[in-house]
Image (spheres, coloured by chain):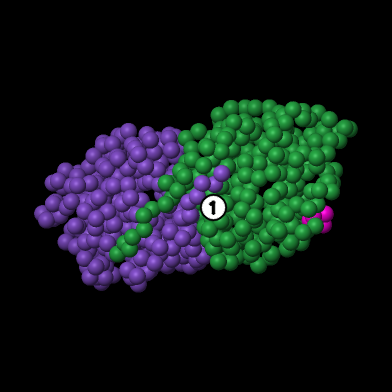
Chain colours: A purple, B green
Amino acid sequence: MSILVVGSVAYDDLETPFGKKERVLGGAATHFSASASFFTPVRLVGVVGSDFDQQQIAFLKERNVDLTGLQVQADGKTFHWKGRYGYDLNEAQTLETHLNVFAQFKPILPKNFQESPYVFLANIDPELQFNVLEQVKAPKWIAMDTMNFWIQGKLEALKRTLKKVDILFVNESEARQLTKEHNLVKAAKKVLEWGPKIVVIKRGEYGSMLFSDSLTFWAPGYPLEDIKDPTGAGDSFAGGFLGYLATHKGDMSEPNLKRAVICGSVMASFQVEDFGLDRMRLLNKKEINERFQAFKTLSHFEETIIL
Amino acid sequence: MSILVVGSVAYDDLETPFGKKERVLGGAATHFSASASFFTPVRLVGVVGSDFDQQQIAFLKERNVDLTGLQVQADGKTFHWKGRYGYDLNEAQTLETHLNVFAQFKPILPKNFQESPYVFLANIDPELQFNVLEQVKAPKWIAMDTMNFWIQGKLEALKRTLKKVDILFVNESEARQLTKEHNLVKAAKKVLEWGPKIVVIKRGEYGSMLFSDSLTFWAPGYPLEDIKDPTGAGDSFAGGFLGYLATHKGDMSEPNLKRAVICGSVMASFQVEDFGLDRMRLLNKKEINERFQAFKTLSHFEETIIL
């Protein structure tokens, strides 16, 4: 069953201690789609400018990403982000942000997209996220991402959107900023009172945690010797997580949610192995399955009564 | 089988956002002993001053901690540490350090201690650690801890001790400082070339990782809503880890090492629930077993081929 994603499509200039690349295909919706498409068909809604090279996303079409919702603004340029990472790859430093056509982005869902059973609202203005939900008819579940910029500037709009959302993805510092709780267990509990049934807190190389009323689950970050570029890791995580749920009729049972967290972790771990979408272009299902198994080796232990 | 620990016995003045306590029983050897004693008999070697209240460690004796190696220096005072934690409980700020009798500490092993099959060298001068090993006759394995102070000031002595050691415990920043590698996988590989068969990297609330030539294992930090005082978490971790191994004839097979990491995590998670040794005084085996099971719920998932 198809999953709808609404968010940015961008060009990134990236600098990490391991290299420098310019005009790399990026954006939350792009990263999400590339990741989720291994699991389920995706419908992308976004906007690009006249400078955008459609050839660069041709591989997404081949993977069942429906791009009819990708608007092209002939009189503008594509969203352009320039960022740098130090050895601590958990935190990006933004050098330049040119919103370009993204500044006036009004998400419009093609008619057949309005019937999407699953929705991912990538990190955009919470008012636009709300507006997207008004266009979707009867979604089985809705997930969203956000960022510090909206928490600081549009908290009320964000909370209004949160009320309609089943799953919230945030990183650790955003969870703290949003709830004003330093302790993550307390932070998650607070979010669960505001609407979502599930909160997923992403912690970079430290992995991620999922909280619901009855479940707390922890997934490791896959220990990689070479991480080239962490950009898009969070959206690849969401893509693996939600893509996996979508292939299982949206089933949010606890065993399925746990596997979804691992699928998210698997996809994020591949994403960071190369710049932009380079790793995703080459990735195959066998590798995904193998790494899923590797997560088991990494964190499972044989159970015994110890004392 | 008994495990020998050599290290500090101290009084701590502690300040966290959740309270303030003075002259709390602390020190690496004390925390290690309290934790390991749930699993196996312990032999403690350390030093205290004339101000030390032996009554405070009476409960350790009841738990099979042999204190014949605890020297009392009548002409001096006990090691006294004053520290503060902010909301980020991963990092302590040292306010005062009075080494007192610990400054001249010369570990002397009582005759029966020299036959100890298992040894934990808590965080002391690496030259003293080496000296302890010269007094131990035929240990089955040796584990050690260290800190930034020795990495910076006594690196050569530290590496000499490392050569004789089977298991190294370090925290994340120490691992980086010691190896000059930011990536932890690379850092662990480097340490494994220097002598130890096993490196355990402690990451505070983010859990811990174990590396050997053939195994990489990751344990979560137990998600607690109330952490009162992180002091001693690392030594409690080592106590649970090594105590567990010692009760299993020192078995360092991979399934046993994985369980040892979890036992370490379990004991550290209790340690931080209260100040000083307060939680350890009240803890019982049933609680330990239950939390061991809780770690399974937290990190295990049902395995399936996902794609």
Q: Is residue B133 magenta?
A: yes
Q: Nearer the viewer, residue A147 or B182?
A: B182
Q: Is residue A224 magenta?
A: no
- Type of amino acid at the residue the image marks with label 1: Arg
Mark 1 lies on a secondary structure that is helix
Position of A41 with respect to A14 (left or right) is left
Residue B208 can be seen in this image: no
Instruction: Give the residue pinned by disc 1.
Output: B259
Q: Position of residue A20 (x, y in %)?
A: 46, 67
The residue drawn where x is 41% and y is 37% is A187
Residue B268 position by quadrant:
top right
Q: Nearer the viewer, residue A85 or B109?
A: B109
The residue drawn where x is 86% and y is 35% is B73
Residue B136 can be seen in this image: yes
Check the picture and name the quadrant holding the C terminus of chain A.
top right
Q: Main secondary structure of the magenta part?
A: helix
The residue drawn where x is 84% and y is 35% is B72
Q: Position of residue B100 (x, y in %)?
A: 81, 37
Q: Position of residue A158 (x, y in %)?
A: 30, 39
Check the picture and name the quadrant holding the N terminus of chain A.
bottom left
The residue drawn where x is 72% and y is 40% is B65
In the rendered structure, the residue with mark 1 lies on which chain?
B
Magenta segment boundaries in residue numbering: B132-136
Position of A127 with respect to A305 (left or right) is left
Q: Nearer the viewer, residue A49 or A116?
A: A116
Q: Which residue occupies the extreme left position in the image?
A: A111
